[in-house]
Image (spheres, grey):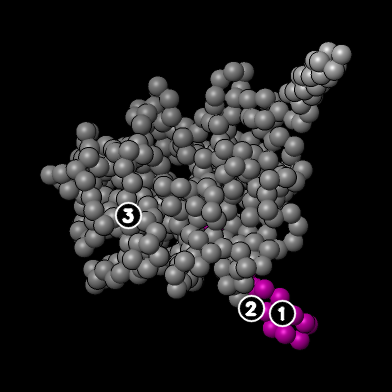
């Protein structure tokens, strides 16, 4: 009798377990991915339960790993952050405010926007729209919104979607699908690069009016586009050691582009914000070299450090550079690095273009036993801090000058 009772009880437990599994599988929660719904915002406006920050600023955020060197996040962020100068109110009406550097970034797993104040070490979530899997983000200079690119499933087909995501959590808008890259000028104009079998088109969009203008067309389909100064555009063929690369300048108001660089193997470029010079890296006889082109004179100057142009950022005045410089370079670059088959261990250097003097800023491996492959370098307007992402794990870092 006891044996039959045990069998009945065990059967009931199994059935209840199956019923619970079916309930949680089909009726509990929301869809778990972009492909589950045409709307990319899953639970838009709701708080993400997995986030540590739920309301108000969190004190003591970030991890100081060495003097002046801080790891802001443990997990990955979307490539591209913005650093602003803000005034932190005093503790009373008679206490003066304090200037601080605020870093705004997007958490990759959720799409939430965070603001981290470097000196206060406070972290605040300022937008909780759920937009997982963001690839990169191009920010407006005032940090008010970011152009976030991510993979969205449309009718069973994966497409690259670009959404203008307001930092304050408000409603944004979509740009056209499958843009190769986007950017924002100092005057807050949006520029886009679309490529296909027929070639590539660089366009500008005025956010206030929605007016779209075509700046540049080329039969080349594998190119990058970067703003240069106020209205010019530098278009560069995608870098590879296997092919000759070229760069073209389309000056504002010009009828046609002019070639400014090439042929160079593995060519990549980084125009300066003042519209005077273009930093470029290339491969010569198996070695990576870094140089600067003066647009007015069309003369080039080789720099005393060897790295890829993508691992640098211009100072706001265009007179110096900050670069992540690998401690060792292989002969299969830049292709192996772009493909993720190789990672670097970088030191941060400053290069004065007037004197060609290179100064070591910090060696993360030496001071913190942390190898960092630096990408997406960003400076605040007064050079108070340098922000960068570790390509290896996607974490966000800051060096406080």
Q: Is residue 306 left or right of residue 196?
A: left
Mark 3, other Cα within 10 Å: few <14 / some 14–19 / many ≥20:
many
* Relative depth, front residue between 141 and 24: 24
Whether the magenta-drawn stretch holds residue 145 is answered as no
**Residue at the spot 35% in from the left edge and 70% down from the top edge:** 361
Pick the quarter of the image with the N terminus: top right
Q: CA distance from mark 1 to mark 2?
A: 7 Å
Q: CA distance from mark 3 to mark 2?
A: 36 Å
Residue denoted by label 3: 345
Q: Is residue 138 visible?
A: no
For numbered disc 1, what is the local secondary structure?
A: loop
Residue 63, horizontal then vertical, whole percent: 53, 64
Label 1 with label 2: CB-CB less than 8 Å: yes
**Residue at the spot 28% in from the left edge and 55% down from the top edge:** 326
Q: Is residue 143 left or right of residue 276?
A: right
Q: Considering only order in the chain, which callout, 2 or 1, is on the residue closer to the N terminus?
A: 1
Total count of labels: 3
Q: Is residue 171 above or below residue 304?
A: above
Residues shaded magenta: 81-98
**Residue at the spot 35% in from the left edge and 36% down from the top edge:** 339
Residue denoted by label 2: 98
Q: Quadrant of residue 32?
A: top right
């Amino acid at each position: 009798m006891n044996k039959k009772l045990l069998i009945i009880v065990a059967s009931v437990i199994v059935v209840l377990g199956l019923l619970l599994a079916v309930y949680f599988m089909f009726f509990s929660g929301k869809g778990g991915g972009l492909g589950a719904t045409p709307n990319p915002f899953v639970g838009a406006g709701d708080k993400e339960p997995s986030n540590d920050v739920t309301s108000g600023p969190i004190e003591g955020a970030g991890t100081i790993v060495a003097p002046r060197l801080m790891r802001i996040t443990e997990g990955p962020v979307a490539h591209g952050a913005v650093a602003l100068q803000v005034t932190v109110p005093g503790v009373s009406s008679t206490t003066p405010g304090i200037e601080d550097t605020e870093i705004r970034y997007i958490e990759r797993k959720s799409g939430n926007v965070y603001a981290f104040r470097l000196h206060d070490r406070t972290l605040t979530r300022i937008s909780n729209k759920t937009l997982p899997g963001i690839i990169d983000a191009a920010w407006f200079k005032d940090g008010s919104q970011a152009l976030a690119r991510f993979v969205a499933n449309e009718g069973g087909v994966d497409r690259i979607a670009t959404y203008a995501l307001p930092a304050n959590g408000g409603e944004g808008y979509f740009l056209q699908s499958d843009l190769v890259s986007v950017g924002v000028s100092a005057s807050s104009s949006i520029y886009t690069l679309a490529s296909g079998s027929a070639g590539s088109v660089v366009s500008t969009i005025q956010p206030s009016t929605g007016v779209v203008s075509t700046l540049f067309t080329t039969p080349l389909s594998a190119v990058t586009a970067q703003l240069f100064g106020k209205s010019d555009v530098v278009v560069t063929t995608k870098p590879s050691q296997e092919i000759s690369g070229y760069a073209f300048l389309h000056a504002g108001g010009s009828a046609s582009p002019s070639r400014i660089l090439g042929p160079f193997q593995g060519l990549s470029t980084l125009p300066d914000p003042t519209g005077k010079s273009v930093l470029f890296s290339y491969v010569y006889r198996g070695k990576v070299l870094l140089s600067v082109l003066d647009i007015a004179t069309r003369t080039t100057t080789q720099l005393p450090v060897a790295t890829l142009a993508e691992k640098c950022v211009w100072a706001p005045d265009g007179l110096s550079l900050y670069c992540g410089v690998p401690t060792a370079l292989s002969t299969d670059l830049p292709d192996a690095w772009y493909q993720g088959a190789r990672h670097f261990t970088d030191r941060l250097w400053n290069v004065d273009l007037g004197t060609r003097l290179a100064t070591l800023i910090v060696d993360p491996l030496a001071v913190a036993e942390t190898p960092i492959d630096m990408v997406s370098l960003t400076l605040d307007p007064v050079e108070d801090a340098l922000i960068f992402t570790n390509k290896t794990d996607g974490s966000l870092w800051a060096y406080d000058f």
